[in-house]
Image: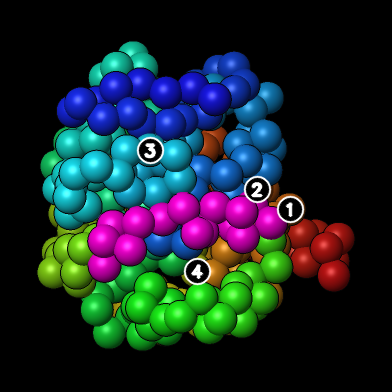
Amino acid sequence: MSAVVIDGGLVHYEAFGRGKPVLFLHGWLGSWRYWMRTMEAVSDKNRTYALDLWGFGDSDKSKPRYGVSNYVALIDDFVSDMGIRDAPIIGHALGATIALEYAVRYPDRVKKVMTVSLPMGAESINRKLMDFVNTSVVSKVMWWRQITYKEVQKEIEKASKDAVTASMQSVAEIDIDSRIESIHQLQDSMLLSVYGEKDDIIDPNVSNDMDNKYKQNIRRIILNESKHFPMLDEAAKFNRLLKDFLDVQGDLSVLELKEEWRRRHR
């Protein structure tokens, strides 16, 4: 276990691999741990980092610093402490919002962002996520059975209720469309937005306009057999897509879910 002290609190992180840095940010359900297989998949050419956000996993829960702005500051301090420069950020759900906000605020520090299950607004977040926070232990156990991945099951109960509630409220207040437009205006920045078609936590259909509205440096891709965790639901396909994204230069329209992927992984 590795940790750094930021703003007086312990921040747990893990890192492995060699090469160009890549940073992974988790969402509301779990911690850094569900990124582990993805990190391993790209660690042959990359130095991969993943941290537990304030209020999640094994990071500090002593202060109410659970707004998106707090998390953006956390990421900025973390990359500074680690000596990370120009690292693509891969964020999931809450982490996707943080990654997008960070890229807009610091366009000189990150050029590539991959958002996974990005909430496009309060209406795109299923109420069952908030219900999960407020339900009884018995109800939680029943709900957890729907999540079959041990990487998530082991970590989900560590999350602070206040962290989930406050961060959801903060995410709901952000105008995601304006953030995406800001990235679109930055010619040397790229945003790949990935959704699971069967996601029952974040509605992927709210992002449909992205396909027609943006070109070149903005791209949306749907993984047809994935729910809320595409990196686990369709790991081979997701990892191949991520590798292509890390390698691509300039125009994201070249990224596709190739036919050979579909045949190989049926």
Mark 2 residue type? Asn
Label disc, if present, on residue 59 of the rendered structure: 3
Count neighbours of disc 3 (C-alpha within 10 A) and say few if under 14, some if 14 to 19, many if 20 or more: many
- In the rendered structure, find residue 181 and report the number of the disc placed on it: none
Question: What residue did someone put label 2 on?
Answer: 239
Q: Amino acid at mark 4?
A: Tyr
Distance between the alpha carbons at the discs numbered 2 and 4: 14 Å
Which residue lies at the image location 77% right of the left edge and 59% below the top edge?
Answer: 261
The residue to which callout 1 is attached is: 236
Label 2: which secondary element = helix
Magenta residue check for 160: yes
Q: Position of residue 7 (x, y in %)?
A: 18, 28
At horizontal 35% and vertical 21% (from top left) the residue drawn is 4
Determine crowd level at label 4: few under 14, some 14-19, many 20+ residues with C-alpha closer than 10 A: many
Mark 4 or mark 3, earlier in chain:
3
Image quadrant where residue 126 sits: bottom left
| CB-based contact (under 8 Å), mark 1 and mark 2 | yes
Label 1 and label 3: CA atoms lie apart by: 29 Å
Residue at 80 percent across and 60 percent down: it is 260
Residue nearest the viewer, comparing 88 with 260: 88
Above or below, 225 against 102 in this view is: below
The residues bearing labels 1 and 2 have C-alpha atoms spaced at a distance of 5 Å
Question: What is the quadrant of the C terminus in the image?
Answer: bottom right
Numbered mark located on residue 195 in the image: 4
Q: Earlier in the sequence, mark 2 or mark 4?
A: 4
Please state which of residues 128 and 225 is positioned toward the viewer in this rendering: 128
How far across and down, in percent of the image, does residue 103 sit? 24, 43
Amino acid at dot 3: Ser
What secondary structure is marked by label 3?
loop
